Amino acid sequence: MNEAEAFAAVRKSLKPRRFEHTERVTEEAERLAGLYGADVGKARLAAILHDYAKYRSPEEMRQTVIEAGLNRKLLFFGDEILHSFVGAYYIKEELGMEDEDILSAVRYHTTGRAAMKELEKIIFLADYIEPGRSFPGIEEVRETAKVSLDEACLLSLKNTIGFLVKKKKPVYPDTFEAYNYYTMNK
């Protein structure tokens, strides 16, 4: 799959504002990949595809979790995280994406996980800090991402967990594990 094919696939599945977000995430992923010597082509392709399932219905995604044999604990942490895990599954099944690095980057772009691979960190951060985002703490993460992917991931995980705790929302276990990993491996 090339970029034009990926953009065509996501353009059909995303609303215009979300497509613009995807374009900004793609530019941010390219910038981070270039800065850290990662594969720019893979970073751009993963970024283009990262929200492929964003507008699938929660019912469809929940059913896919069950039918595809994905981790059923996904069903207990709110619908917001489903699109990343189910999205990786759809990208493989519907678009024929076989590159496990790209699938994994899409899968963990909302939750993170312990010991993320470089491409996973790039997509996780690119989605978090793309220029259209504005919320407390984001500038510190943007500045930190210029010097350390791990430290920027830690800051974004800390912010996300703090936000969810304030809202009395459950925190997906991978996010806690990622926070602990990057705290203990500084």
Image (cartoon, grey):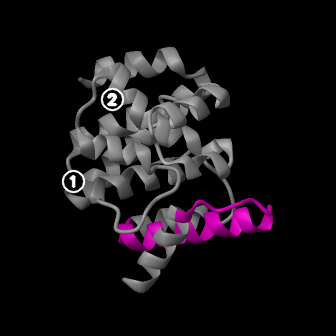
The secondary structure type at the circle numbered 1 is: loop
Name the side, left or right, on which 86 lies relative to 36. Answer: right
Instruction: Locate residue 47, reporting x and y percent.
Output: 39, 39
For this rendering, which residue is in front, 179 or 128? 179
Name the side, left or right, on which 36 lies relative to 90. Answer: left
Task: Give the residue pinned by disc 2.
Answer: 92
For this rendering, which residue is in front, 77 or 119? 77
Callout 2 environment at 10 Å: few (<14), some (14 to 19), or many (20+)? Answer: some
The residue that appears at 64% across and 62% down in the rendered structure is 171
Task: Give the residue pinned by disc 1.
Answer: 38
Residue 21 in the image: above or below residue 15: below
Q: CA distance from mark 1 to mark 2?
A: 22 Å
Name the side, left or right, on which 77 lies relative to 124. Answer: right
In the rendered image, residue 152 lying in the magenta stretch gets the answer: yes
Range shown magenta: 146-173
Return the disc, 1 or 2, that comes first in the chain's sequence. 1
The amino acid type, in three-letter code, at marker 1 is Ala
